[in-house]
Amino acid sequence: MKPFYYGGQAVIEGVMMRGRRQATVVVRRADGSLLEHTETLPATLYRGRLARLPLARGLVALWEMLILGTRMMLFSARIHARLEESQEIPRSVVGGMLAVSMTFAIGVFFVLPLLLARAGSAAVHGSVWATVLEGAVRLALFILYLALIGRLRQMNRVFQYHGAEHKTVNAYEHGAELTVPSVQRFSTIHVRCGTAFLLWVVVISIFVFGLLGHPPILVGIVERIVLVPLIAALSYELLRVGAAFYRVSIVRFLLQPGLWLQRLTTREPSDDQVEVAIAALRPVLLADGVESAAIAGVDPVYRRAQVAT
C-alpha cells in the first residue's frame, strides 16, 4: 500500500495542514493565543476510487489548492483583521476570489507569454522555437512575480510560515519528534512543495503547447485556457513520481530547479511559527490514527505502515 503524503500551505499568521480525513488550520491571534479550525474532507472526493487514479488525483489536488486553500486563507485573514471568527465565509466570496485569481494567473502566465512570443516571433524561426520562447517568457514572469511578492512585508511573514510548514512535514517524514527544537533542525525545502509543482506546470506547458504547433492566436489562447487542468494534473503526477524516487541521482538532478526556486517562497521561521505548524499537523495525524507518530519519533517503517492508504 502506498503512503499518504501529508502537506499543507501557509496562510496569514498561520498554517493549514491536510490529511486523509480533515484539513486543519491554526492561526496565531494578536494576543498570542492559537486558534484552530478544522474542516472534514469529503470522503467521495478524497478517498474514493477516482481520487486514486492517475491524473484524476491531480485534479483533486488542484481543486484543493484553489478552493480549500482560498477558504483557509480567507479564514486566516478574518482572524488577522480581528473579525468574527465564527462567521461563515459565503460561497460567493470564495467563488469571486477564485475567479479573480484564476483570471489573473491564466492571463499573466499563459496568455501574456503567448502574446509576447507571437510579437517576437519574427526573431525566431519555426513553431518549435516560438513555443520555447513562450515558455522562457512564462518562466521569467513566474520567477519575477515570486521575487516581487517576496519583498512585501506581509508576504515575507507568510513565507516564514511556509518554511515552518516544510520543516514540520520534513520532521514527520523522517520520524522525528514533533517538538519545536526537533523540527527546527530540518530544512525549509521540500520536494513536494507547491512552488516546485508550479515550476513543473511551466515546463510541461512547453512540451504540450509544442505538440499543438502554431495555431491562430485566438485558437492558441483558447488552448492555453482549456488545457491548464491537464497540464496541472500531469505536473502533479511527475512531482509524485519524483518524490517516490528521490534517492535516484537522475531524479534528484531533475527536481533540483524546483528546490532552488523554493528559496524565493520560504524563509527561516521563528520558534513561534514552528509551534503553529506543529499544532496544525498534530490533529490531522490524530484523525488518521497515527497518534504515536504525532507525539514522538518512531521508526520510519512503522510510521509508513501507519499512514498507508
Image: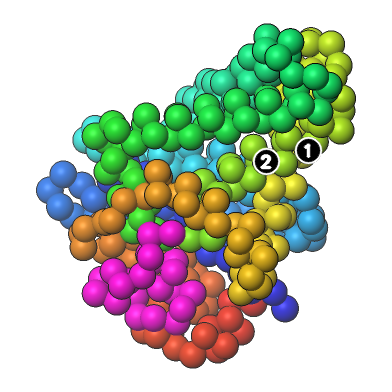
Q: Amino acid at mark 2?
A: Val
User: x, y percentage for residue 230?
Assistant: 77, 39
**Render colour scheme:** rainbow
Looking at the figure, which quarter contains the N terminus? bottom right
The circle on residue 207 is: 1
Q: SS class of the residue under badge 2?
A: helix
Q: Nearer the viewer, residue 92 or 99?
A: 99
Q: Is residue 258 above or below residue 296?
A: above
- The residue furthest left is 31
Element under label 1?
Answer: helix
The picture places residue 250, in percent across and down from the top left corner, at 67, 66
Residue 305, quarter of the rendered image: bottom right
Is 188 drawn above or below residue 140 in the view shown?
A: below
Asked if disc 2 and disc 1 are in contact, CB closer than 8 Å, the reply is: yes
- The residue located at (86%, 16%) in the rendering is 215
Q: Looking at the figure, which quarter contains the C terminus?
A: bottom right
Number of marks drawn: 2
Location of residue 74 by image quarter: top left
Which label is found at residue 278? Answer: none
Q: Is residue 201 left or right of residue 78?
A: right
The kind of residue tagged 1 is: Phe
Q: For the point 18% across and 55% down, which residue is it?
A: 33
Please indicate, yes or no, whether residue 64 appears anywhere in the rendered image: no
Query: Which residue is depicted at the point 63% across and 20% down?
Result: 113
Residue in the picture at 62% in, 30% down: 136
Q: Which residues are magenta?
A: 167-189
Read off the residue under disc 2.
203
Q: Residues within 10 Å of mark 1 (few under 14, many from 20)?
A: some
Residue 119 rendering spot, x and y as whole percentages: 68, 9
Q: Is residue 298 left or right of residue 82?
A: right
Return the x and y of residue 49 as percentages of the image width and height: 79, 60
Compute the Cα span from label 2 to label 1.
Answer: 7 Å
